Image (cartoon, rainbow, N blue to C red):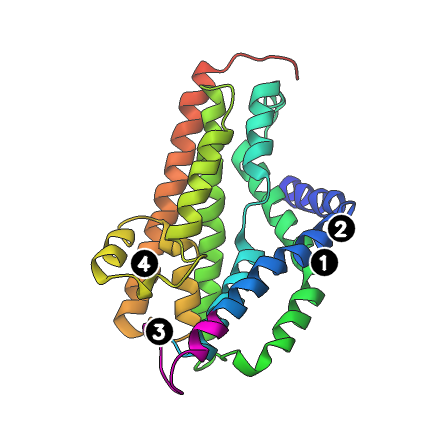
Amino acid sequence: MKKYWHVLNVGIQNNLTYRFNFLARTVFGLVPLIAMLYVWKMIYQGKKAGDTVGDYTLAQMISYYLLATIVDALTAVNEDDWQIAADIKDGNISQFLLKPIDYLWFRLCLFVSGRVTYLAVAAVPLALFIFYWRQYFVLPPDGTTLGFFLVSTGLTALLQFFMSYTMAMLAFWVLEVSTFIFILFAFEYIASGHLFPLDILPHGVAQVLFFTPFPYQLYVPVSIYMGKIVGAELLRGLLIQMLWVVAAYLLARFAWARGIKKYSAVGG
């Protein structure tokens, strides 16, 4: 474990070198969010007081997007898939085949270090942004709900990473994986609830999406926090999320094992 702890520390130090980039990305990343929030404010202004869209009041809708931003800051994969694909294409993974270090856990440590650094840099602008919208921000119903939200967010981070890692493994077979990564991102953005809460969709469409891992990458933890998923449904949601994490991990291991058999060192 010491070697992975060292990787984590080195990763944090390396990421701190780019702290201004993280800050700029955070600040400018809030621009489309601001536009989305004002669009929803205009939508609700055309309704009577107390009217809802789906089951969401204006405060709940804005809280949903603020929480989605927080979850995204904690869990989003930031260029890890591109870096993994580059390691494969450039032959840099050869060193991991000769040393007692697992490449998946190595990359997971770098992913965690990236999230820790990003959160440290982005915490202040995010906190100020949420403070500005504080009149709309909905607090969790209780401490237990907050605990389940944190557990679900941790599972979301793992699911995001393992899916991106698996997608990057395609570099063993194809020279350019960018198209596949963009396709996955497009599905994630829509089907995970980034664009809008999934429960405002027609019931049949929402049910189909829940047969995929995407809702468990954002919508589920946010809905747990807001108290929209409770009781037996909450426990079932967490169990399904855990199963998706295990499935993504096994698929990542399988893709690596098959890819290594095809791998030919180039450079490195």
Which quadrant: the C terminus? top right
Disc 2 + disc 3, Cβ < 8 Å: no
Residue 258 in view of the camera:
yes
Which residues lie in the magenta part?
Answer: 40-55
Q: Secondary structure at mark 2?
A: helix
Label 4 vs label 1, nearer the camera:
1
Query: Counting residues from the N terminus, which is met first, the one under dot 4 or under dot 3?
Result: 3
Residue beneath the point at 43% across and 72% down = 43
Residue 54 magenta-highlighted: yes
Q: Secondary structure at mark 3?
A: loop
In the displayed structure, would residue 241 be above or below residue 95? below
Disc 2 + disc 4, Cβ < 8 Å: no
Label 2 vs label 4, nearer the camera:
2
Residue 144 in view of the camera:
no
Query: Counting residues from the N terminus, which is met first, the one under dot 2 or under dot 4?
Result: 2
Percent coordinates x, y for residue 144 in the rendering: 43, 77
Would you name the residue on which mark 3 appears? Answer: 53
In the displayed structure, would residue 263 be above or below residue 37? above
Q: How far apart are the two marked residues, 2 and 4, measured between alpha carbons?
A: 36 Å
Q: Which secondary structure class fits the magenta region best? A: loop
Q: Secondary structure at mark 4?
A: helix
Query: Counting residues from the N terminus, which is met first, the one under dot 4 or under dot 1?
Result: 1
Q: Which mark is residue 19?
A: 2
Q: How far apart are the two marked residues, 3 and 1, measured between alpha carbons?
A: 34 Å
Foreground pick, 2 / 145: 145
Residue beneath the point at 43% across and 44% down = 186
Foreground pick, 249 / 165: 165
Q: How far apart are the two marked residues, 2 and 3, measured between alpha carbons?
A: 39 Å
Would you name the residue on which mark 4 appears? Answer: 239
Would you name the residue on which mark 1 appears? Answer: 121
